[in-house]
């Protein structure tokens, strides 16, 4: 450990020296050692803290020194909390934030994976937009309820980049629990011209238009590591619940309420475990095949989900 710290100290001192500032290796070493050995601060963060200390101490103009940036890595390489990293990623989706401390929360992704991100309100960053790509510099990994996430704080930077970052392979298999079903699920109406789902009998493109009935579920699968937003079509739903379009219409008629189909589907589908295969779209996993999980596999997943 001592050697490693020594090596890091020399690197930091050298960086200052090459910018024309004489920083003693011994001073750097003392501070690094304290942070890493005594306070158990992760290496990357210790390097940055010490570098920042000497920047202040010598009043070095920020642009004159190549500050120790966190390494640019892929999302799949984020394995433990407390890693300071930089990521090139696309904002996959934004969630509603329930806390005043959080400016934005959602998912970002690159070719290797998708991860939850939080931009703290105190970070004072410009807002990111869904579908846009950014270079996130100096963000820190964290784990919450057993899942990795990245936090964007005052030390981080966000720059929009003119690159289209591909998300992970499209065809994937997931094993997990269905933890939520969205409101616009169940017996829905689609526009006859464009097949879009009507909201209050209105197509977002064609306005009041002729429509037809369809059955679908938009939900969230949790596999203990990631969340997947999924879409189930009529065939999937019928296979799992026995309720197809005809049955759904009967349920709606009996209850004089189309929403009763959604309640019925929720009670039959929610909280259960599934094995499914699907194609990843920009946002949703379009399910091609889904089955209820057998008891053995299910226990394993349950363990995973409780795990931490
Ligand atoms: Zn339409």
Image (cartoon, rainbow, N blue to C red):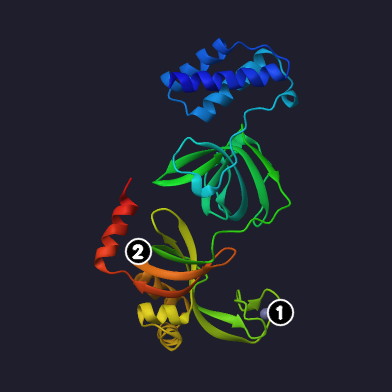
SS category of the residue bearing label 2: loop
Residues under numbered marks 1 and 2 in contact, where contact means CB atoms less than 8 Å apart: no
Q: Residue at x 46, y 86 (%)?
A: 245
Which mark is nearer the camera, 1 or 2? Answer: 2
Q: Is mark 1 within 8 Å of ligand 1?
A: yes
Q: Where is mark 2, residue-wise?
A: 271
Question: Which residue was labeled with disc 1?
Answer: 206
> Which residue appears at 66% of the width and 47% of the height?
134
Residue 100 point in image, percent of width and height: 56, 41
Quarter occupied by the N terminus: top left
191 and 19: which one is in front? 19
Label 1: few (<14), some or many (≥20) within 10 Å?
Answer: some
**Please, is residue 148 above or below residue 178 in the view?**
above
* The image quadrant in which ligand 1 is located: bottom right
What is the secondary structure assignment of the residue under circle 1? loop
x, y percent for residue 287: 48, 72
């Amino acid at each position: 450990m001592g050697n490693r710290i020594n090596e890091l100290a020399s690197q930091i001192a050298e960086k200052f020296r090459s910018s024309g500032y004489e920083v003693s290796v011994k001073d750097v070493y003392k501070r690094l050692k304290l942070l890493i050995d005594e306070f158990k601060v992760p290496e990357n963060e210790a390097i940055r803290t010490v570098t920042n200390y000497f920047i202040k101490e010598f009043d070095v103009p920020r642009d004159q020194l190549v500050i120790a940036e966190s390494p640019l890595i892929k999302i799949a390489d984020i394995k433990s909390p407390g890693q300071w990293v930089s990521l090139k990623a696309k904002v996959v989706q934004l969630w509603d934030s329930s806390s005043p401390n959080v400016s934005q929360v959602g998912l970002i992704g690159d070719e290797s994976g998708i991860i939850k991100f939080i931009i703290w309100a105190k970070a004072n960053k410009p807002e990111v937009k869904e579908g846009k790509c950014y270079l996130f510099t100096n963000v820190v990994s964290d784990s919450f309820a057993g899942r990795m996430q990245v936090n964007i704080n005052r030390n981080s930077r966000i720059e929009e980049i003119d690159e289209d970052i591909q998300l992970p392979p499209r065809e994937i298999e997931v094993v997990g629990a269905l933890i939520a079903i969205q409101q616009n699920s169940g017996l829905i109406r689609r526009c006859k011209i464009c097949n879009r789902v009507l909201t209050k009998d209105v197509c977002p493109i064609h306005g009041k238009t002729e429509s037809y009935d369809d059955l679908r579920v938009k939900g969230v699968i949790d596999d203990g590591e990631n969340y997947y937003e999924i879409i189930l079509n009529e065939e999937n739903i019928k296979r799992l619940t026995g309720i197809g379009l005809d049955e759904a219409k009967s349920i709606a008629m009996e209850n004089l309420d189309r929403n009763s189909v959604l309640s019925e589907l929720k009670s039959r589908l929610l909280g259960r475990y599934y094995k499914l295969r699907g194609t990843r779209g920009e946002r949703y996993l379009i399910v091609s095949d889904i089955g209820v999980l057998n008891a053995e596999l299910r226990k394993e997943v349950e363990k995973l989900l409780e795990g931490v």
